[in-house]
Amino acid sequence: MSPYKSILLCSGLVLTAQASVLQFTNPTTCCSLLDSKFPGESKVFSSTALEYEALTFYWTPTAQVLPRCVFTPYNTNDVKKAVKLFARRNCQFAVRGGGHSYNPGWAGIKKGVLISLGNMNHTTYNAGTGLATVDGGSRWTDVYGDLLPYNITVLGGRNSDLGVGGYLTGGGISFYANKEGWAADNIEGVEIVLGNGTVINASKTQHSDLLRSVKGGSNNFGIITKFRLATVNATGLFNGWYMRYPFASTDSYLAAAESYCNGGVDTDTRSHIIFSASIVGMGNMTNVALMAYDGALDPSNPPSVLGPFFDGTVANPTFQWFAPNGTIKSATDGLRDAQGSGNRYTMTTLSIRVELSLLKKLRKAWLEMTTTDLRVIPGFLVQFAFQPVGATWIAASAAKGGNSMGITEPLAVMWIQLRWDNQSDDAQLLQYSRRLIRRFEKIASRAGKLASFRYLNYGDRFHKDDIIPSYGSESVTRLQSAKELYDPDNVFGRLVPGGFKIPGY
Ligand SMILES: Cc1cc2nc3c(=O)[nH]c(=O)nc-3n(C[C@H](O)[C@H](O)[C@H](O)COP(=O)(O)OP(=O)(O)OC[C@H]3O[C@@H](n4cnc5c(N)ncnc54)[C@H](O)[C@@H]3O)c2cc1C
Ligand SMILES: *[C@@H]1O[C@H](CO)[C@@H](O)[C@H](O)[C@H]1NC(C)=O
Ligand SMILES: *[C@@H]1O[C@H](CO)[C@@H](O)[C@H](O)[C@H]1NC(C)=O
Ligand SMILES: *[C@@H]1O[C@H](CO)[C@@H](O)[C@H](O)[C@H]1NC(C)=O
Ligand SMILES: *[C@@H]1O[C@H](CO)[C@@H](O)[C@H](O)[C@H]1NC(C)=O
Ligand SMILES: *[C@@H]1O[C@H](CO)[C@@H](O)[C@H](O)[C@H]1NC(C)=O
Ligand SMILES: *[C@@H]1O[C@H](CO)[C@@H](O)[C@H](O)[C@H]1NC(C)=O
Ligand SMILES: *[C@@H]1O[C@H](CO)[C@@H](O)[C@H](O)[C@H]1NC(C)=O
Ligand SMILES: *[C@@H]1O[C@H](CO)[C@@H](O)[C@H](O)[C@H]1NC(C)=O
């Protein structure tokens, strides 16, 4: 780190003084300068343009903020020209992939310029190298659809509507995670537009420090225009389904969940389970297991690790298929359709080391804190979910070169997802989610089972400055060194205010 940065880090006063000296160019000026770079090409849309509404639509309206204009690049050169201009003129901007972040201003910006990557959405496959090349603005449904004719796929969203850009730079939990690791660890290379407008390829042999940094480093290093991804065999059948178990099955459900998390998962890494529980309005809590299997699945003779969830050990299951004996595309399209857009949502996360008594304590605290005054709020839904990051997953990630996330021991990523109807209820429900996660932290910490990791893609606005530090000091130091090398002017911190930032930037 340069001495200049160290001084800034050590002194809040200096930071404040420095900030007041910075002059950002008026966004209207930035928009017209940008437009003049692309004469007659209609790539810049102001709020009066017909396209503006669709371009500023987010999966959840909770995330929406309105930019002065939206820029829609078609290729890397377009992105390069824009970033060069913004850096030279001190224009603030945001970068949007699929627009699935829950947080306002993460993939959007009030008044500045929004770069929306949706027109950069091609996928190709090179049978010689076995790698797929995926443009930075693609969505998984198109990626899977383009690759399946070759009988292969890549590690991507379990909901196919997600964008590749945010998902992969945040880590990425895919249905293949238990066997193949984080989706980010299956990135073999990226083409990235740096803060000074230079385009470089980072791979395992060239700028490997940058490649590692973007695996969990989010939007802090540049705009990724292409991902080169390792592929996996998709010749076989793929299954995705939900099972629900009533409130009364809770004890056996949690016992089976604990056993799957603490080793079960490693015995059959083609399996995948998200353990969740939901409360909808005043209805009773139900236990849910969202499951997938990379292979054919006969419900009357399931793979043995899934046995307890089928054979009555966890009592009274009800099935809901979204892709019986289908493909990765039909399973993830099924989840996309089940998780429709348009509602207000938030999500918050922590990680624990799994222990049955802790799971019970957390469930109990959650039920206590989900009081009637909250449950009567229009559209109220709360989900409490967790899933293991097991030994095989961690080893697979490490073998592929490692990432920024600093996980060395098995843990479970845990999250709370909240849904509601009205903007007028935002403050109350955001506070509830914040209180819940703090209480969870206390309970897990008292049990000696709190893990430091917080998953970026499930992080909330209240943890803006806590996510990347949760990767541990070794990762943070590596990320800071990469910032000095690849974004020395901190274009992606100073001019891109949205997202989870690296300490000091
Ligand atoms: C319904 C739903 C289901 C989900 N399911 C899963 C799941 O199965 N597994 C999982 O791991 N996560 C899941 N998530 C979380 C998801 O990974 C994140 O929301 C992720 O940010 C989505 O990526 P995006 O491109 O759509 O997001 P955006 O909101 O567009 O972007 C998120 C962040 O990434 C940055 N960014 C986007 N593209 C680029 C790029 N090309 N270069 C540099 N920076 C970029 C943006 O600036 C922004 O800060 C889910 C979320 C939702 C809403
Ligand atoms: C993909 O990009 C093209 C332009 O390059 C655009 O016309 C098309 O609508 C995009 N597809 C999606 C699904 O956004
Ligand atoms: C894909 O697999 C199917 C079924 O196994 C086979 O018929 C087809 O030829 C394969 N396609 C390619 C491109 O290998
Ligand atoms: C990046 O790699 C691609 C594919 O190998 C190549 O076409 C392109 O020219 C490279 N770009 C740079 C800036 O090196
Ligand atoms: C892919 O999996 C199928 C079975 O699902 C198998 O027959 C085939 O040999 C595998 N292909 C490769 C390249 O591993
Ligand atoms: C939920 O189910 C449990 C167990 O069957 C029962 O004890 C409880 O009263 C139910 N609560 C509601 C609100 O129905
Ligand atoms: C999936 O296919 C297998 C045979 O390959 C069959 O035994 C099983 O019943 C099928 N499952 C479903 C849900 O149809
Ligand atoms: C809140 O939601 C309810 C039900 O969806 C709706 O009827 C009502 O008009 C909303 N109230 C406000 C203030 O938006
Ligand atoms: C842009 O930044 C990169 C990384 O810091 C550096 O290698 C490159 O020389 C810079 N290019 C220009 C034109 O300044």
Image (cartoon, rainbow, N blue to C red):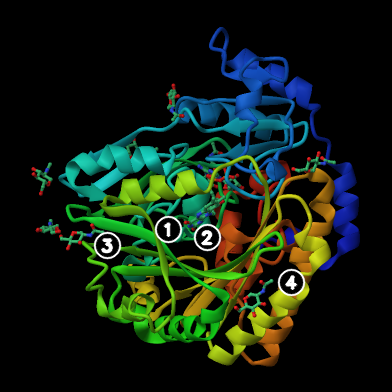
Inspect the image, locate mark 3, and give the three-letter code of the amino acid beneath it: Asp
Q: Would you call the spot at circle 1 few (<14 residues within 10 Å), some (14-19), or many (20 or more)?
A: many
As drawn, the label of residue 436 is 4
Q: For the residues labelled 2 and 1, say whether their Cβ atoms are less than 8 Å apart.
A: yes
As drawn, the label of residue 184 is 1
On screen, residue 224 above or below 86:
below
* Residue 138 horizontal/vertical position (percent): 43, 37
Inspect the image, locate mark 4, and give the three-letter code of the amino acid beneath it: Leu
Tell me the mark number nearer the camera, choosing from 1 and 4. 4
Q: Which of marks 1 and 3 is nearer the N terminus?
A: 1
Rounded to the nearest whole Å, what is the CA distance between mark 1 and mark 4? 29 Å
Inspect the image, locate mark 2, and give the three-letter code of the amino acid beneath it: Gly
Q: Earlier in the sequence, mark 4 or mark 2?
A: 2
Q: Nearer the viewer, residue 407 or 306?
A: 306
Q: Mark 3 points at which residue?
A: 294
Tell me the mark number nearer the camera, choosing from 4 and 2. 4
Rounded to the nearest whole Å, what is the CA distance between mark 2 and mark 1? 7 Å
- Left or right relative to 159: residue 26: right
Q: Would you call the spot at circle 3 few (<14 residues within 10 Å), some (14-19), or many (20 or more)?
A: many
* Residue 359 horizontal/vertical position (percent): 59, 84
- Quarter location, residue 273: bottom left
